[in-house]
Image (cartoon, rainbow, N blue to C red):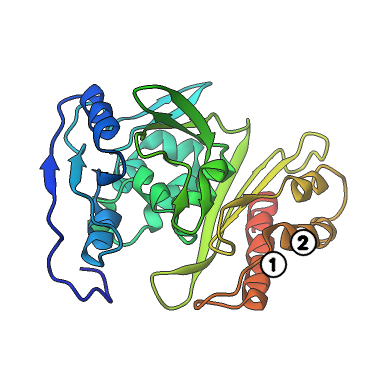
């Protein structure tokens, strides 16, 4: 039970274990907003206990063959199914080798018990700013495949997240995969976060750098979460690092752009001023590590 929940039980519902993706789509088409998908169940069960949601139908997809896949194809990238857990992602060798920021994020989710239950798709659908999947997937230009009986859509993560606990998932849709392109050649990436002595982080940063010593070929990506209601990439700041110059000077030039675009929020966990301070410190730290090995 999550902290703060006054309930020890779940509201009543009908539990369904479909045998195929087609059956899932038919159930969602029939029941719409009255149904919820159960993969890891970490968020759904907590929300149901807190009476934030009370679906009449819970559709369990955990055991459905093919939905817990994780596959890497050289030159194309990763394909992650909706029932794939954080532990499976963190343990997958191509993720360790090629997608450092995603490996960091999956490894930092809760504890091992939680990572063995929580799924990356569920982490995204929860749409809470501090969730670890958001910055790392935004960093890698990940796309979600959303499927219904009538259509199939591709959305980038930052398009999918509309606000706090608000997504662009239609009631008759299910996310069938996360597609993550091959990272840039010769790139390294890092994900870091700062918490407020609780489970809620207040500044999450994903950073990627390739060809750090060659300005004309240098590529820098920066993605932020937890600091604002939605995850954010800052391409205007990334462009600064294509120019020659001392790293400290380039960061000094990029930081005002980053802060303006992220627009750190004030909430019960931290002030805008404190988040701005953390973003400055963490951005400098991860870029120095990726560019200079420090």
Task: For mark 2, give the secondary structure.
Answer: helix
Q: Quadrant of the C terminus?
A: bottom right
Q: Position of residue 256 (x, y in %)?
A: 79, 63
Mark 2 packing: few (<14 Cα in 10 Å), some, or many (20+)?
some
- Work out whether mark 2 precedes mark 1 in sequence or the reverse, and give the earlier one: 2
Cα distance in 3D space between marks 2 and 1? 7 Å
The residue at which mark 2 appears reads as 255
Residue 110 location, quadrant: bottom left
Residue at image x 24%, y 27%? 26
- Image x and y of residue 235, in percent: 73, 45
CB of mark 2 within 8 Å of CB of mark 1? Answer: yes
Mark 1: secondary structure: helix
Residue 47 located left or right of residue 109: left
Relative to 171, say whether 293 is above or below: below
- Residue displayed at 85% across by 55% down: 246
Up the image or down, 66 lies above or below 157; here it is above
x, y percentage for residue 98?
A: 50, 36
Nearest the viewer among 225 and 162 is 162
Q: Residues within 10 Å of mark 1 (few under 14, many from 20)?
A: some
Judge by depth and name the residue closer to the eye, 236 or 153. 153
**Residue 280 circle label:** 1
């Amino acid at each position: 039970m999550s902290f703060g929940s006054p309930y020890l039980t779940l509201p009543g519902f009908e539990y369904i274990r479909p045998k195929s993706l087609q059956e899932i789509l038919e159930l969602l088409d029939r029941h719409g907003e009255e149904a919820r998908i159960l993969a890891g169940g970490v968020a759904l069960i907590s929300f149901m206990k807190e009476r934030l949601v009370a679906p009449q139908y819970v559709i369990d997809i955990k055991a459905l063959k093919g939905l817990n896949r994780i596959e890497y194809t050289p030159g194309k990238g990763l394909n992650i199914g909706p029932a794939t857990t954080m532990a499976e992602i963190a343990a997958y060798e191509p993720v360790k080798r090629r997608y450092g920021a995603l490996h960091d994020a999956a490894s930092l989710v809760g504890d091992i018990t939680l990572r063995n239950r929580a799924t990356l798709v569920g982490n995204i659908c929860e749409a809470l700013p501090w969730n670890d999947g958001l910055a790392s997937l935004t960093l890698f230009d990940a796309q979600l495949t959303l499927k219904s009986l009538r259509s199939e859509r591709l959305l980038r993560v930052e398009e999918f997240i509309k606000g706090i606990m608000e997504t662009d998932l239609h009631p008759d849709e299910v996310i069938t995969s996360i597609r993550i392109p091959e990272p840039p050649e010769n790139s390294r990436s890092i994900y870091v976060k700062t918490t407020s002595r609780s489970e809620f982080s207040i500044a999450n940063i994903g950073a990627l750098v390739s060809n750090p010593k060659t300005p004309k070929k240098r590529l820098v990506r920066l993605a932020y979460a937890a600091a604002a209601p939605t995850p954010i990439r800052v391409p205007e700041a990334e462009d600064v690092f294509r120019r020659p110059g001392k790293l400290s000077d380039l960061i000094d030039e990029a930081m005002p752009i980053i802060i303006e675009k992220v627009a750190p929020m004030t909430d019960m966990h931290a002030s805008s001023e404190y988040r701005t301070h953390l973003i400055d410190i963490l951005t400098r730290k991860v870029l120095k590590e990726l560019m200079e090995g420090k």
